[in-house]
């Protein structure tokens, strides 16, 4: 930023110089102007190098920030995909568990019905045997009378 200071000195020198009437021109000290120009030449490469470095550093920082932003976006997309997959897995697990429960309830109903039918069939046979036995007992009693 020394360059700005040198340019301000040059500007002050021109503004404070003696003006030639009716011409818009001014008289300046040649040696003083040449000394300022020499100083500008000496400082200019350093300032240009610094400006170039700042520009390159800015570009590097922007590229690094863009890469980091892209990585963050990619990680977020992967996380979203993972969560979606986990959601799908959970959803399928619930569906399978509901199907298993439904099948178990259906099997339990069928077993209950089968058990009732079996019990009814056994009781019916027992009833038939008891009726036949009762009939035999009645016949035997009749014979005894």
Image (spheres, rainbow, N blue to C red):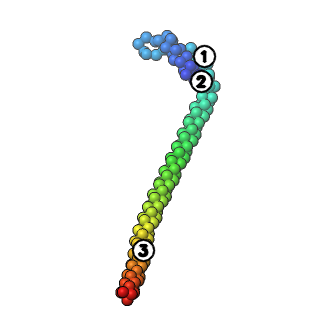
Q: Residues within 10 Å of mark 2 (few under 14, many from 20)?
A: some
Q: Residue at x 43, y 16 (%)?
A: 24
Q: Quadrant of the C terminus?
A: bottom left
Residue assigned mark 3: 119
The answer to whether mark 2 and mark 1 are in CB contact below 8 A is no
- The answer to whether residue 89 is left or right of residue 31 is left
Q: Which disc, if any, is residue 40? A: 2
Residue drawn 59% across the image and 19% down it: 36
**Residue tagged 1:** 31
- Where residue 126 appears, as percent x and y from the top left, is 42, 79
Q: Is residue 135 left or right of residue 46?
A: left
| Residue 37 drawn above or below residue 100 | above
Distance from the alpha carbon under mark 1 to that under mark 3 = 129 Å
10 Å crowding of disc 3: few (<14), some (14-19), many (20+) = few
User: Could you tell me which residue is drawn at 43 percent across and 72 percent down?
Assistant: 115
Q: Earlier in the sequence, mark 2 or mark 1?
A: 1
Q: Residue at x 51, y 47 (%)?
A: 76
- Cα distance, mark 2 to mark 3? 115 Å
Element on which disc 1 rests = helix
The residue lying toward the viewer, choosing from 110 and 133, is: 133
Q: Is residue 120 visible?
A: yes
Label 3 secondary element: helix
């Amino acid at each position: 930023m020394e360059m700005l200071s040198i340019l301000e000195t040059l500007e002050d020198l021109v503004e404070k110089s003696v003006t030639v009437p009716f011409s818009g021109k001014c008289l300046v000290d040649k040696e003083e102007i040449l000394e300022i120009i020499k100083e500008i030449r000496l400082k200019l490469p350093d300032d240009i190098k610094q400006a170039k470095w700042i520009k390159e550093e800015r570009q590097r920082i922007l590229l690094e920030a863009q890469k980091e932003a892209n990585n963050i976006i990619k990680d977020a997309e992967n996380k979203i995909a993972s969560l979606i997959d986990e959601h799908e897995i959970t959803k399928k697990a619930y569906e399978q568990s509901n199907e298993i429960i439904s099948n178990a309830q259906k099997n339990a109903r069928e077993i209950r019905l089968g058990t009732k039918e079996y019990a009814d069939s056994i009781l019916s046979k027992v009833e038939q045997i008891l009726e036949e036995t009762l009939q035999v007992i009645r016949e035997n009693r009749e014979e005894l009378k």
